[in-house]
Image (tube, rainbow, N blue to C red):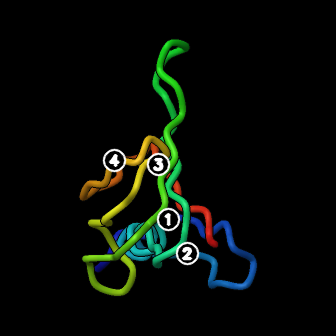
């Protein structure tokens, strides 16, 4: 039996599984979207990048990005990051 938790979505059944919660939290992006990474302290600023290519399946990480300073790199975003659709 799957462990269940109360659903916060009124269009779903009363309970959902932890697996369904994990699936809903998977970050997805496409080329042209913006990746925002929040700073952890007052001295650490927010970083922004453009998603150039998605290397994972179905929009999942890793992402090839270009940061606002012009550097490019492959990123596996953490919990401090979010995707803003283009």
Disc 1 or 2, which lies upstream in sequence? 1
Which label was assigned to residue 51?
none
**Residue 77 horizontal/vertical position (percent):** 35, 53
Describe residue 2's horizontal placement relative to residue 32 as left or right. left
Dot 1 lies on which element? strand
The reply to whether dot 1 and dot 2 touch (C-beta < 8 Å) is: yes
Identify the residue under disc 4: 71
**Residue 12 horizontal/vertical position (percent):** 65, 84
**Residue 23 horizontal/vertical position (percent):** 40, 74
Identify the residue under disc 3: 81
Residue 31 vs 68, above or below: the answer is below
Disc 3 or 4, which lies upstream in sequence? 4
Q: Nearer the viewer, residue 9 or 44?
A: 44
Around disc 2, counting alpha carbons within 10 Å, would you say few (fewer than 14), some (14 to 19), or many (20 or more)?
A: few
Disc 1 or 4, which lies upstream in sequence? 1
Closer to the eye: label 3 or 2: 3
Q: CA distance from mark 3 to mark 4?
A: 18 Å
Q: Nearer the viewer, residue 23 or 19?
A: 23
Where residue 73 sits, quadrant-wise, is: bottom left
Q: CA distance from mark 1 to mark 4?
A: 42 Å
State the residue at coordinates (69%, 73%). Answer: 9
State the residue at coordinates (39%, 80%). Answer: 59
The reply to whether dot 1 and dot 4 touch (C-beta < 8 Å) is: no
Dot 2 lies on which element? strand
Dot 4 lies on which element? loop
Which label was assigned to residue 15?
2
Closer to the eye: label 1 or 4: 4
Which label was assigned to residue 5?
1
């Amino acid at each position: 039996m799957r462990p269940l938790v109360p659903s916060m979505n009124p269009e779903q059944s009363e309970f959902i599984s932890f697996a369904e919660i994990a699936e809903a939290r998977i970050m997805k992006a496409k080329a042209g979207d913006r990746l925002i990474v929040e700073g952890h302290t007052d001295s650490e600023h927010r970083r922004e990048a453009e998603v150039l290519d998605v290397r994972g399946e179905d929009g999942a990480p890793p992402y090839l990005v270009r940061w606002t300073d012009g550097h490019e790199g492959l990123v596996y975003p953490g919990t401090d990051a979010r995707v803003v659709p283009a």
